[in-house]
């Protein structure tokens, strides 16, 4: 998976990848506003203390040295933006001036740069949405995505990922209480059921307890290794179909996520959407299809396929 900006192993700030890195992705050039909004507020709140009681936009602080004055101005601008009292254009214009003039703390610079990338994503999403609907000033005619992942791939509909409720998100059933390989349930629930773009940290599969030892045992015994939906328990992937287990581990290690090819996919329960998102028929977000010179390659979150067989 390609990466986008925010990188952390925190359970509050997941990794992001950019769908534009996939040459077969026709419509989503950047991480969505919804996905980025999930990450930025906690990061901002940790870096930016709340404004003093009664503080107003542009209010000068009496603290000597001006340090508190700089912080309050930026915080109040961010508060006004979040409440809709300040437009995105005005905020970024003034904030860029503060950034270039050195009026931001180091923590605020980090937050500001992340917000700039968020704004780019917001604008790109709007441009593409306008283009798909009927053209825009940037795209003269309606954009039509022509997707062909090959005859083996079973395509799905966007409606399969619609919200099924506040407790289960896009999934038809709740996440299993205990996941295989001691996968973190909080990360799994967020990635599987309340997310379309985020991914577990690269290399996560090699850090959880039990996975690599089981993989090593499968390598020696020549047995296969199965991967089940973390919500429904349905069989989604098998590691060795059409290749040896060493090949599976080598490719997964190289890319950072469990990687499967068409032959390892159980198409009875797996679907691929037009933008390359891989999902289960149950509504579980699995990962993405990022084709390479060898064909379709499904980068899958381990937390999404750590279920026990139903």
Image (cartoon, rainbow, N blue to C red):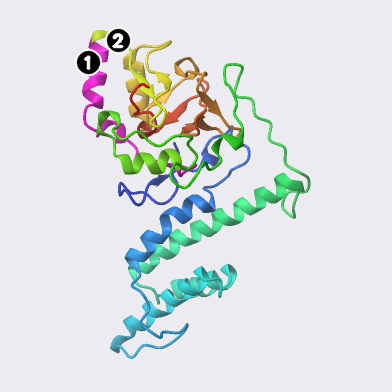
Q: Position of residue 156 (x, y in %)?
A: 59, 29
- Report if residue 278 lies within the magenta region: no
The label on residue 46 is: none
- Residue 289 visible, this orientation: no
Give the residue drawn at x 46%, y 75%: 98
Between 287 and 250, which is closer to the camera in this rendering?
287
Residue 42 position within the rendered picture, expressed as x and y whole percent measured from the top left: 37, 59
The residue wearing badge 1 is: 217
Please report the bounds of the magenta region as a residue range.
Answer: 194-220
- Give left or right: position of 37 versus 66: right
State the image coordinates of residue 272 (x, y, percent, origin top left): 55, 28
The disc label shown at residue 223, or none:
2
Q: Residue at x 30, y 86 (%)?
A: 65
Of mark 1 and mark 2, the one earlier in the sequence is 1
Left or right, 185 with respect to 144, comes to left
* Neighbourhood count class around disc 2 (C-alpha, 10 Å): few under 14, some 14–19, many 20 upward: some
Q: Position of residue 211 (x, y in %)?
A: 26, 26
């Amino acid at each position: 998976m390609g990466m986008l900006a925010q990188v952390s192993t925190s359970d509050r700030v997941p990794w992001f990848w950019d769908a534009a890195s996939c040459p077969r992705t026709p419509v989503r050039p950047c991480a969505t506003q919804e996905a980025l909004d999930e990450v930025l507020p906690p990061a901002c709140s940790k870096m930016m203390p709340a404004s003093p009681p009664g503080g107003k936009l542009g209010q000068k602080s009496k603290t000597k040295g001006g340090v508190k004055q700089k912080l309050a101005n930026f915080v109040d601008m961010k508060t006004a933006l979040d409440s809709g009292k300040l437009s995105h254009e005005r905020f970024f214009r003034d904030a860029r001036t503060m950034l270039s003039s050195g009026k931001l703390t180091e923590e605020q610079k980090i937050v500001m740069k992340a917000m700039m990338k968020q704004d780019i994503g917001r604008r790109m999403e709007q441009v593409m949405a306008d283009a798909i609907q009927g053209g825009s000033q940037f795209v003269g005619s309606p954009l039509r995505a022509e997707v062909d992942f090959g005859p083996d791939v079973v395509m799905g509909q966007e409606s399969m990922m619609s919200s099924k409720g506040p407790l289960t998100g896009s999934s038809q059933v709740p996440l299993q209480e205990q996941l295989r390989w001691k996968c973190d349930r909080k990360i799994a629930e967020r990635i599987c059921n309340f997310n379309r773009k985020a991914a577990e940290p690269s290399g996560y599969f090699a850090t959880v307890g039990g996975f690599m030892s089981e993989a090593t045992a499968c390598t020696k015994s020549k047995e296969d290794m199965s991967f089940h939906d973390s919500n429904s328990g349905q069989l989604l992937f098998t590691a060795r179909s059409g290749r040896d287990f060493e090949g599976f581990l080598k490719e997964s290690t190289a890319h950072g996520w469990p990687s499967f090819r068409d032959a390892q996919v159980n198409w009875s329960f797996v679907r691929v959407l037009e933008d390359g998102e891989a999902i289960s028929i149950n509504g579980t977000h699995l990962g993405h299809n990022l084709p390479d010179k060898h064909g379709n390659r499904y980068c899958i979150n381990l937390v999404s396929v750590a279920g026990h067989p139903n």
